[in-house]
Amino acid sequence: MELVRTSALVTGGASGLGEATARSLAERGVHVVVLDLNDERGRAVARDIGGSFAHCDVTSPADVESAISLALDHAPLWSVVNCAGIVWAQRTLGKDGEYGSAHDLDTFRKIVEVNLVGTFNVCRLAATAMSHNDPDPDGSRGALVLTASVAAQDGQIGQVAYSSSKGGIMGLTLPLARDLAVVGVRVNTILPGLIDTPIYDFAPDPAAFKAQLASNVLFPRRLGMSTEYAHLAIELLTNSYLNAEYVRLDGGARLPPK
């Protein structure tokens, strides 16, 4: 699939995996719309790559439709990479065995709402816009990349909400690809492993924490890089015979229970 002179949406594009992907797409002649809630950082990335910024809550149809319109003002929308997401860690049961200390249900709903429902919201609306594209010789009108996590398969203690949301994204992939085949839109999902992004900066000693995490990686014994995710996302977008696949990007890591 050809990317030059097309537009793309990248959710969570202000940092981490999304920023790396936005930059990689821009290098290939794509007008990238960076979708994020961080206005300052999102505008800075968009300005740096010659793209556009859209303040966007991925669970909001109005926000997503506005971002799509912004993309279409520049070029036909052919690519979407979903990187927006939030994390949470909490065990199902509290230490005191009381109902009130069980996993917070509103938080569980919030994680699933942003990570899974938000991903689907972006995909359903973007695919609608793509369905109006003139097809290429393969009959293609665009491609979607979803981001799950190795936690979808190797969920650790305390990851019930996060793993459920990411497992839902895996489950979304095949039926979504089947739904969208009629208009020539492909769907693939990346399951990143331990990628070096700002998500780990909460630790008192981020360097030591990352080194500990890297001990679970088979080879190379390090955290992954955002650019490696971006390279894979580009391949999934441009390789017209890749469809309905889940690809782990994890250096062979299999996460232990904790």
Image: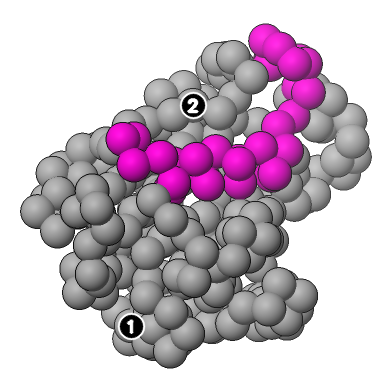
> Residue reaching furthest front?
137
Q: Position of residue 192 (x, y in %)?
A: 55, 35
Residue bearing the label numbered 1:
65
Residue 248 got which mark? 2
Give the extent of the magenta segment: 214-242
The residue at the point 39 percent across, 83 percent down is 72
Q: Position of residue 109 (x, y in %)?
A: 34, 57
Is residue 188 something one can see in this rendering? Answer: yes
Query: Does the segment drawn in magenta span residue 231?
Result: yes
Q: Residues within 10 Å of mark 2 (few under 14, many from 20)?
A: some
Up-down: is 120 above or below 245? below
* Residue 28: quadrant of the picture: bottom right
In whole angstroms, how far apart are the C-alphas of marks 2 and 1?
30 Å
SS class of the residue under badge 2?
strand
For residue 246, side relative to residue 125 (left or right): right
For residue 149, side relative to residue 194 (left or right): left
Q: Position of residue 52 (x, y in %)?
A: 59, 82
SS class of the residue under badge 1?
helix
Q: Quadrant of the C terminus?
A: top right
The residue at the point 75 percent across, 16 percent down is 220
Q: Nearer the viewer, residue 234 or 257?
A: 234
